[in-house]
Image (cartoon, helix red, strand yellow):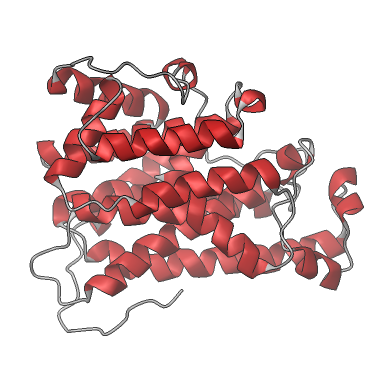
Amino acid sequence: MAALVKDQKRSEIVVDVKPDMVIPGTMYLLKEAYDRCGEVCAEYAKTFYLGTLLMTPERRRAIWAIYVWCRRTDELVDGHNASHITPTALDRWELRLEDLFAARPYDMLDAALSDTVSRFPVDIQPFKDMIEGMRMDLKKSRYENFDELYLYCYYVAGTVGLMSVPVMGIAPESKATTESVYNAALALGIANQLTNILRDVGEDARRGRIYLPQDELADAGLSDEDIFNGKVTDKWRNFMKIQIKRARMFFKQAEQGVTELSQASRWPVWASLLLYRQILDEIEANDYNNFTKRAYVSKAKKLLSLPMAYGKSFLSPSSHTQSSLLRV
């Protein structure tokens, strides 16, 4: 879901809600609030929205509310008002989050999430961690090694899995440990964000940002200047092969965990996994030119993936206890 938040065009309703815009005491009907979240999800994350329709109504609405909050948070540093966002604004957004968890929503979209966290065992920490990722984006444009980059990916994307698992639920018949299911959700978020990074190298470079491990670039004989020049060379191809292999490893780690979710929650997660993983294939098909070509999955390929994702949603959970399916 984190990747879908990042991938779609910007929504005006999200951009227009500034972190310091508070409407204390305003009451909204919850149905209207959830319906609005559903409309945003349907317009800007069509495939994911389609999958959520298979969930129970309560879970479906809750996932919509989480999606919209993540999208609004991402907009703070990536939307067209991003140049005006300061650390203080993010501090206000975090205080607003705390109010939301304390059943004091500021607006309609907050009200939906406030109701969600009262119905499901959703912890506030992943939400706070996502805001921390936004703070990192304001002050950091280079990552010395993969450990630093992993932490960033956790903040801005891995957190979404931790937010979502309590809502999606673990299948009653699953014998996997709760830890392993959360680790798988975390792995999917990391995989999606790494894919975003690899797809958007050229776009990020034009903003002066390089979300690639500096030590690994140096080992490959590459520098920041090579990124800014945007030329596909054999050194770049070899570097990209290693980065794509790592992203695919995280997708693979995520797969088993999807089967442990409640059956009605699996389709949108499988769809996200299968579709996003195909972006890596498209980068390869573009001869690793992610400087001037944007890798995207065609509508035809997306349509072909949906039945596959639907079929995989019927895979049975593990039949034996696994102390840790995934270590990431």
Number of dots carrying numbers: 0
Tell me the residue at 62%/69% (across/down). 147
Residue 246 image point, x, y percent: 59, 68
Residue 72 lies in what quarter of the image? top left
Observer able to see residue 300: no
Q: In this rendering, would 60 be left or right of 77?
A: left
Tell which of 127 and 280 is nearer to you: 127
Tell me the residue at 15%/42% (across/down). 118
Tell which of 18 and 75 is nearer to you: 18
Q: In this rendering, would 118 be left or right of 9?
A: left
Split into 4 quadrants, where in the image is the N terminus?
A: top left
Residue 259 lies in what quarter of the image? bottom left
Q: In this rendering, would 218 be left or right of 85?
A: right
Tell me the residue at 15%/56% (across/down). 263
Residue 57 image point, x, y percent: 11, 36
Tell which of 270 and 16 is nearer to you: 16
Q: In this rendering, would 274 be left or right of 194?
A: left
Is residue 294 depicted above or below 308 in this figure?
above
Residue 40 image point, x, y percent: 35, 23
Residue 176 lies in what quarter of the image? bottom left
Is residue 210 depicted above or below 16 in this figure?
below
Observer able to see residue 165: yes
Is residue 316 depicted above or below 59 in this figure?
below
Tell me the residue at 22%/66% (across/down). 260
Residue 276 image point, x, y percent: 48, 49
